[in-house]
Image: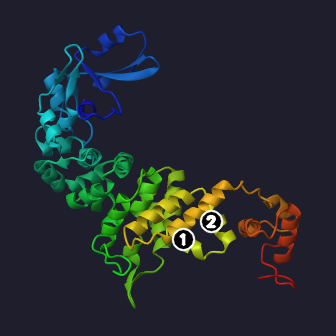
Amino acid sequence: MRDLLLGRCPRDLDIVTAAHPEIVVGLFDRTITVGQEFGVVAVVAAGHAYEVATFRREGPYLDGRRPSYVEYADVRADVRRRDFTINALLYDPLFDTVLDFVDGRADLQRRIIRTVGDPIERLREDRLRMLRAVRFAVELGFAIEPATVEAIRAHAQDISGVSAERIRDELLRLLLAPGRSEGIQLLESSGMLPVVLPEVAAMAGVPQPPEFHPEGDVLTHTCLALRHLEQPTAVLAMATLLHDVGKPPTYSVTDRIRFNGHAEVGAAMAERICQRLRLSAAATRAVTALVRDHLRIGDVPRMRPGRARQFLRRPEAGELLALHRADCLASHGDLGAYHWALGVLAEVAASPPRRRLITGDDLIALGYTPGPRFAEMLEAVVLAQEEGEVATPEEGRTWIRARFKAGSTTRGTEPGSTS
């Protein structure tokens, strides 16, 4: 009901009724009991499964997530167990009216997030509600009501007891919301950021060289970079959040403030963070690669043309460019390298895909022993192809023989070698 009143397209549909599960089952041809202990039945109609829940009240929450018992009740009791007033609005289709027992419509008009009843009690029932309050605020552009904010601050440490998967899902939804930058700031001011993402919280107060970062400390820069993203994927948003996570541990002052090796350190940290949050292996690899290489777009104009094209043929090149753009706009504002790389990327996209001239089997056939440098040798041939040095498999084999000793994967040193 909340989204309909706001003129938004609802993401899902919650159906509640006074009818007990056995009555619901008897009314429809196809049903699935999905949560009998909670009075929930899935009704399958027109190819969709709609969950229908019986009005209920809940006993005390002993584990910070689930009630100790559930019993059937009336509609008012059902509403009083819900998290926030804006989520406790019901629509009665028979009478075409909105049922509002908790002033949820007024809170929608005032654009505030407020718990149903006592905020401490509501947040203790399910500690994830603290993070959900922030997520709703940034998704809707609302403010969190002061008493709810104070309850979150008082119990921010309790978010540590929530499963990593539930935290991940809320965090990713927050990062995809237009107010993602404000969301991270809310997590920081509420005290949850040091619990959920201590590595990101550590960026607060870490100074940066003002000639490159007039905006301020590392966390300020990160929040600005998040703001400059345009409809990011979850991977890009997470990588932007973590792109400078390696700066606090690499901070030093010599001739000026420096963060030597922060991209490599940050990539290792990002990998651990993604694993801790239970991101998929593919998403973890993608985030880690973006953090590791987020500085490299700035080097593209100085690369040899073939090397630049080879670099921008990578699947993640588009997201690297988007991260570089946000990074620049959040600091010095110079987009020269971005526009240069964008032009090269357009040329690469317009050209036909490169056919790989040499494979690992070809190297073995040429007498090379498989080893860790096979990948380097194959990549070297691809670069030579980009530079126009080779165009056929035979030329590729000749090129390899001239540069690497047969029988091993060490680079050749015989006359004619270019090492």
Q: Position of residue 27 (x, y in %)?
A: 34, 8
Q: Residues within 10 Å of mark 1 (few under 14, many from 20)?
A: some
Asked whether, in this view, residue 307 is left or right of residue 316, the answer is: right
Q: Residue furthest bottom?
A: 255
Badge 1 amino acid? Arg
Q: Quadrant of residue 360?
A: bottom right
Taking the spot 54% from the left edge, 71% from the top edge, the residue there is 296
Q: Label 2, secondary structure: give it.
A: helix
Q: Is residue 262 above or below residue 276?
A: below
User: Which residue was labeled with disc 1?
Assistant: 296
Amino acid type at circle 2 is Phe
Whether tag 1 and tag 2 are in contact, CB under 8 A, the answer is yes
Look at the image and name its color scheme: rainbow
Q: Nearer the viewer, residue 143 or 414?
A: 143
Along the viewing direction, whichever of 46 and 371 lies nearer the viewer: 46
Q: Earlier in the sequence, mark 1 or mark 2?
A: 1
279 left or right of 349 in image: left
Residue, disc 2: 311
Q: Residue at x 27, y 49 (%)?
A: 138
Residue 189: quarter of image: bottom left
**In the image, what residue occupies the spot 23% across and 46% down?**
133
Residue 33, x across and y down, in percent: 38, 20
